[in-house]
Amino acid sequence: MDKKIKILFVDDESVILESMRRTLRPMRQEWDLHFAGSGSEALKLMERETYDVVVTDMRMPGMDGAQLLNEVKKLCPEAVRIILSGQVDRNSFIRATGVFHHFLSKPCDPETLKTNVVRAYSLRRFLANHELRRIVSQIESIPSLPSSYNALMAETSSQDPCLERISQIIAKDIGMTAKILHV
């Protein structure tokens, strides 16, 4: 039997944590669920235990979700990092871009959450080697080929840049495509 996925949910609103606890109760056979009411409480839990997945709200007093996931990335780089938030301003989202794997909007139905957690965790399991998983999880971007970069710069700087040509250049380069999809 596969081991349970160990998940830490972090939200400063106790009503939301309690709702998650009730809603996700049917997942107890597959998931080992833990809950924290703040970023600092989550980090204290992470000093004692490791988690496969960390799901956090973005807007919390003291330590927001981006700050928390940045610390999670350092403490447990293999953990899948998910933001589950209702309101995120542009600057906070940009700040968090390099530290989360998935962003889900509140309210989020349990099936969507389950699908995203299972998918992200399954992808992680494809990398069987612990050291390889650690290295891959720390990669923040895939480099683009110089020829693709030069072609993109030439097209965007031309007198009459064409969106279709730009999209074709990006589509041929996995690094550019990954960055566009990530943003």
Image (cartoon, rainbow, N blue to C red):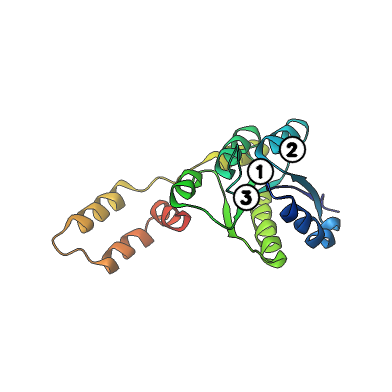
Check if mark 2's residue and mark 1's residue have beta carbons within 8 Å. Answer: yes
Residue at 63% from the left image edge and 37% from the top image edge? 72
The mark that comes first in sequence, 1 or 3, is 3
Q: Residues within 10 Å of mark 3 (few under 14, many from 20)?
A: many
Residue 76 horizontal/vertical position (percent): 66, 36
Residue at 60% from the left image edge and 35% from the top image edge? 71
Residue at 24% from the left image edge and 52% from the top image edge? 153
Q: How many labels does the image show?
A: 3
Type of amino acid under label 2: Thr
- Residue where numbered disc 3 is placed: 57
Mark 1 vs mark 3, foreground winner is 3
- Residue where numbered disc 2 is placed: 50
- Residue where numbered disc 1 is placed: 79
* Front residue of this view, candidates 25 and 1: 25
Check if mark 1's residue and mark 3's residue have beta carbons within 8 Å. Answer: no
Q: In which quarter of the image is the C terminus?
A: bottom left
Q: In which quarter of the image is residue 152?
A: bottom left
Type of amino acid under label 3: Asp
